Each structure stands twice: as C-alpha cells, then as structure tokens.
Amino acid sequence: MVYGDRDLRPDQDDVAPSVIGAEFVAPLNGDEELPATVYLSTERVNKDDKDVTLELRDTADGHRALLAFTSLKQLVAGCGDGQPWVAVQGGQVEEIKSRSGADVVLWDAALPPEERRTRFQQGD
C-alpha cells in the first residue's frame, strides 16, 4: 500500500457523518475496467501505521459509501489537497468494500466544497 497525506490532522470524532447526494457522484460505468491503481480516502495515516481507517460517507439514500478514485488528480479535485489517501490495486476494491462495512463504492465523487480538506486549513 502507498500512503497519502502524512500530516497530523485534528480528530473529528465528534463530527456527524457527511451525506453525499447523487449530484456529487460520477459512477463508474459498468463497461469500464477498474484502473490498476485506485485511491481511497482515509482518515489520517502515518508512515509506520499497519492499519488504515477508511473514510466512509453516508449517501442521501441511506447507504454507507466507500470513496474510490481513478486517479490522484480526481481524489484531490473531489476531496481537496489535504485529504489523506491510500493507493490499492483496483482488483482489491470489492473486497475492501466488504471488509470495511460499506454498501456501495462511489467512484470519483466530489464532496461539497465546504467538506473538502485543504492542506493548510486555518488553525492548523
């Protein structure tokens, strides 16, 4: 695995889960092949971490979603340049979805602008 943003971020355990509506989702077409490398949004990750906590989101229709991106550029565009991430093989996404407790995978979803993480947020 390859880890993304290694900077420490404040804990956000007391924040309600975000809800993503269909207007923010660009689903992967059933005819498209999975990319060799997929980028998943995570909670803060450090170089020596053996486990990674994936960032799951609630959808407007009540599902629990794993955010997956077909490129690092798509992840930054959808989640902000301060979003921690992990890179995995595309063929692992379904297993990761099952093991994480997610119901669906949202491909290249763009979070509402106010929920995107920037590298240099005020107060950091």
Image (cartoon, helix red, strand yellow):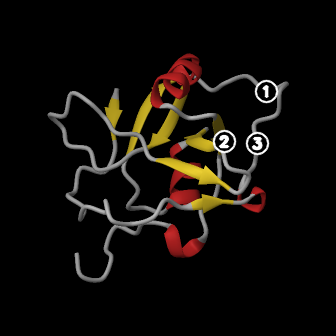
Q: Are marks 2 and 1 in contact (CB under 8 Å)?
A: no
Question: Dividing the picture into quarters, in which one does residue 19 lie?
Answer: bottom right
Residue type at tag 3: Pro
Question: Dividing the picture into quarters, in which one does residue 48 lie?
Answer: top left
**Where is mark 2, residue-wise?**
107
**Residue 14, position in %: x, y?**
33, 65
Residue type at tag 2: Trp
Q: Name the mark on residue 86.
A: none
Secondary structure at badge 3 equals loop
- Nearer the viewer's eye, disc 1 or disc 3? 3
Residue plotted at (36% across, 50% down): 84
Foreground pick, 76 / 65 = 65
Q: Quadrant of the N terminus?
A: top left
Looking at the picture, does residue 80 appear above or below residue 105? below
**Residue 31, position in %: x, y?**
85, 24
Q: Name the mark on residue 27.
A: 3
Q: Is residue 104 left or right of residue 79?
A: right
Residue type at tag 1: Glu
Seen as rendered, the residue at the extreme bottom is 122
Secondary structure at badge 1 equals loop
**Where is mark 1, residue-wise?**
32
Foreground pick, 82 / 73 = 82
Measured Cα–Cα span from mark 2 to mark 1: 12 Å
Q: Are marks 3 and 2 in contact (CB under 8 Å)?
A: yes
Residue plotted at (65% across, 44% down): 63
Q: Earlier in the sequence, mark 2 or mark 1?
A: 1
Q: Is residue 66 left or right of residue 84?
A: right
Labels in figure, total? 3
- Nearer the viewer's eye, disc 2 or disc 1? 2
